[in-house]
Image (tube, grey):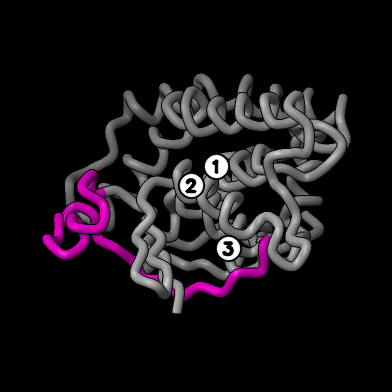
């Protein structure tokens, strides 16, 4: 059995779950309390972060970027499974550029301010949210969603004509923000239309069923037509 060590509102874990779903690779999820620094887990992933993929042959693959590249190499051609990086060098450069942007600047400026303050501090008992960090997240949220909207309105998908890892990385971050109720969709219609398409894919359904004790997403979170 293939296992994925994750946290429900970790965008990097969600990205890997979407890739696994698109490639129709079954997994069993195991929530990992990273702040506990379990010795067994640190042997698999010395950084102590999530996600980590554990294959049924015992291979441990840490870090979301490494996992996604591994899944592309290991399963891209098996049974005609789709490539999520693109078929040309130009496609792959643009896909990787956008993945790096969502997992880097977007995450640092927006996602992680909300995830750390509203989610990780709550579940780990590490204190109250830092209002300054939340203000930083709000100050950058609109412009980043506008960039997603611009990409979505000028292309079929974010990186080009076909669904790619860029869409899954972006949707992973956006879905966390949506779960936390931080997005006013009426102000970002182009981004909303793109997200609705990604949200309607079968690979997304498990994410829409995620729940966190003591936290409830807004009513529209699980709706495909929102």
The reply to whether callout 2 and callout 1 are in contact (CB within 8 Å) is yes
* Residue corresponding to mark 1: 173
What's the mark number on residue 11? Answer: 2
Q: In the rendered view, tell whether residue 205 sits above or below residue 86.
A: below
**Is there a contact, CB below 8 Å, between mark 2 and mark 3?**
no
Percent from the top left, x then y, of residue 84? 69, 46
Location of the N terminus by quadrant is: bottom left
Q: CA distance from mark 3 to mark 1?
A: 12 Å
Cα gap from disc 2 to disc 1, whole angstroms? 5 Å
Secondary structure type for disc 1: helix
For mark 3, give the secondary structure: helix
Front residue of this view, candidates 24 and 107: 24
Picture residue at 68% right of the left edge, 40% below the top: 85
Rendered position, 199 above or below 90? below
- From the image, tell me which residue sits under label 3: 207
| Residue span colored magenta | 23-48
Vertical placement of residue 160 versus 51, above or below: above
10 Å neighbourhood of mark 2: few (<14), some, or many (≥20)? many
Taking depth in this image into account, of 67 and 193 the one nearest to the observer is 67
Could you tell whether 214 is left or right of 168 in the image?
left
- Looking at marks 3 and 1 on the same chain, the residue that comes earlier in the sequence is marked by 1
SS class of the residue under badge 2?
A: helix
Q: Report the quarter where the C terminus lies.
A: bottom right
At horizontal 50% and vertical 73% (from top left) the residue drawn is: 27
Q: Position of residue 37 (x, y in %)?
A: 14, 55
């Amino acid at each position: 059995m293939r296992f994925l060590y994750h946290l429900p509102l970790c965008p990097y874990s969600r990205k890997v779950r979407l890739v696994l779903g698109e490639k129709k690779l079954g997994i069993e999820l195991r929530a990992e309390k990273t702040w506990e620094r379990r010795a067994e887990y640190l042997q698999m992933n010395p950084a102590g972060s999530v996600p980590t993929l554990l294959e049924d042959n015992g291979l441990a693959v840490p870090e979301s970027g490494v996992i996604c590249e591994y899944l592309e190499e290991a399963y891209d051609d098996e049974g005609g499974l789709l490539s999520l990086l693109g078929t040309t060098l130009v496609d792959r450069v643009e896909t990787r550029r956008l993945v790096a942007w969502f997992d880097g600047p977007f995450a640092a400026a927006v996602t992680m301010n909300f995830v750390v303050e509203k989610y990780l501090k709550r579940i780990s008992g590490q204190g109250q949210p830092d209002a300054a960090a939340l203000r930083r997240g709000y100050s950058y949220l609109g412009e980043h969603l506008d960039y997603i909207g611009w990409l979505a309105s000028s292309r079929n998908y974010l990186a080009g004509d076909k669904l790619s890892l860029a869409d899954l990385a972006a949707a992973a971050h956006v879905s966390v923000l949506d779960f936390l109720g931080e997005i006013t969709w009426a102000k970002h219609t182009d981004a909303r239309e793109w997200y609705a398409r990604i949200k309607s894919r079968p690979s997304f359904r498990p994410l829409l069923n995620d729940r966190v004790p003591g936290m409830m997403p807004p009513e529209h979170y699980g709706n495909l037509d929102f």
